[in-house]
Amino acid sequence: MLLKFFTKKKIIIELPISIYQSFGFSKIKTNSYSLKNERCGIVVGTRIDYEKINITHLIEDKTPLLQNPFQVLRVTSHIYPELIRLIENNGNIDYLGEWHTHPNGPICASWIDHSTMKEMVNNLEFGDLKWVILMIFLPDQKIVSYYYENNNYSKIECNLI
Ligand SMILES: [Zn+2]
């Protein structure tokens, strides 16, 4: 009977390949001789059910507060008007979480990434979110994604569709 308790439902993100390509993420290549700045923004879409998260839009902060090959820091006011406009025009979509690139590594979230995301959950300052996702776009067409809820996180799958 305990087995049932430990059965975890698998969450999968679906990202349209057209969005992925339009942001140029497929062109990020591993090349230590040309350090590129990290980029960042927010993820918008719909959670169809517990297991399925559909991304409909990515919004980028094109003028972040801080930006270099190993750090990026977005500003909510740079993104919020676009988010509101999308929600008004599309109806059933909402803020789902954050994205950024790691053009120069690491190939996973850093501890700063994890602590930043954990801080957002159940925090009134961030709109009392129950959960959030983080997507990191890596060189060579790799994506690593995480799901944060109740001060825990897990790595989740992201499929380009
Ligand atoms: Zn990071």
Image: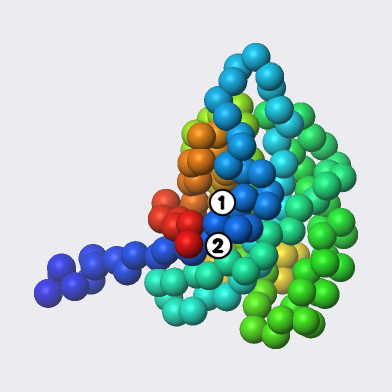
State the residue at coordinates (63%, 58%). Answer: 19
Q: Earlier in the sequence, mark 1 or mark 2?
A: 2
Up/down of 94 relative to 140, above or below: below
Residue 69 pos. (x, y %): 71, 27
Asked if the residue at label 2 sits under 8 Å from ligand 1, the reply is no
Q: Is residue 8 above or below residue 87?
A: above
At x 61% / y 34%, what residue is drawn?
28
Residue 73 visible in the shown view: yes
* Residue ID for mark 1: 135
Q: Kindly indicate the quadrant of the structure image that contains residue 111.
A: top right
Q: What type is the residue that disc 1 sits on?
A: Met
Answer yes or no: do the residues labelled 1 and 2 have beta carbons within 8 Å? Answer: no
Mark 2 neighbour class, 10 Å CA radius: few under 14, some 14 to 19, many 20 or more? some
* Front residue of this view, candidates 77 and 16: 16
Residue situated furthest left in the rendering: 1
CA distance for labels 1 and 2: 14 Å
| Percent position of residue 36, x then y | 71, 28
Q: Is residue 150 above or below residue 86?
A: above
Horizontal and vertical percent position of residue 138? 55, 38
User: Relative to 78, is 136 on the left or the right?
Assistant: left
**Three-letter amino acid code at the position of disc 2:** Pro
Q: Nearer the viewer, mark 1 or mark 2?
A: 2
Q: Which residue is mark 2?
A: 16
